[in-house]
Amino acid sequence: MKGIIFDLDGVIALTEEVHREAFNMAFANYNIDINKYNWNKDFIGKGHRYIIDTIFGECPVKDRLIDLWVYYYQLIATHKIKPVPGIIEFINSKTIPMIIATGSARKSAEIVLKSLKIHLPIVSMEDASMPKPDPGIFLLAANKINIKPEDCLVFEDSIYGIRAALAAQMNVIALTTTHSKEELETENPNYIINDFNDIINDTIQT
């Protein structure tokens, strides 16, 4: 592989529950029925804009709603962000181009990377017109690091993310940080790992 693309939540950091907690705080006084959705099944991997669109529908202030959510995320995330085991060591061991491709808002991604002292370029919600499983965000990421899609390796934890990466004709390693190995196997990624320690300990090679 000549380039590496990382999803953010569930790949770089264990933040999915922090996102959900921030959402609940931000919209506690709004008249919405979040219980009719299965957060893991319906939303993980989709990103801020898709979630707001789905829950609030046509809304002229959806960007403000996203900002509100990210505001609460910023308030609580700093002390709750934990790196996926092995990710820091893995990044530091690589010299090929690397980039983050996330459906989250850019400010949200920057909070995570700053907290973990990771310095990588980002393609975020603001850059992509469609959420995963549309492959657009991964193609944008590959273009930004000037690597052909077929020469990129993607690390993903979500079903939608795996589908997007495969649609972009990229190789995919899936992490079991969000879904079970059995669930991930149905999407046919190239490899499945628990976390980056599996690679560091030579379970597989990249």
Image (cartoon, rainbow, N blue to C red):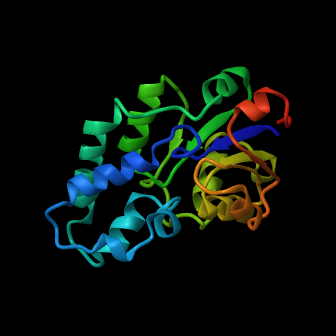
Residue at position x 27%, y 74% in the image: 33
Judge from the rendering whether residue 70 lies leftward or rightward of residue 123; answer left or right. left
Relative image position of residue 166 (x, y in whole percent): 74, 62
Count of numbered circles in the view: 0
Quadrant, the N terminus: top right
Relative image position of residue 17 (x, y in whole percent): 42, 49
Residue at position x 74%, y 65% in the image: 187
Residue at position x 38%, y 63% in the image: 49
| The quadrant where residue 153 appears | top right
Judge from the rendering whether residue 200 lies leftward or rightward of residue 81; answer left or right. right
Residue at position x 60%, y 67% in the image: 134
Q: Say above or below: 73 vs 163.
A: above
Judge from the rendering whether residue 83 lies leftward or rightward of residue 74; answer left or right. right
| The one of 142 and 36 positioned closer to us in this rendering | 36
Q: Say above or below: 89 vs 110.
A: above
Quadrant, the C terminus: top right
| The quadrant where residue 81 appears | top left
Judge from the rendering whether residue 107 lies leftward or rightward of residue 116; answer left or right. left
Q: Say above or below: 105 vs 39.
A: above
Relative image position of residue 54 (x, y in whole percent): 37, 74
Relative image position of residue 105 (x, y in whole percent): 39, 50
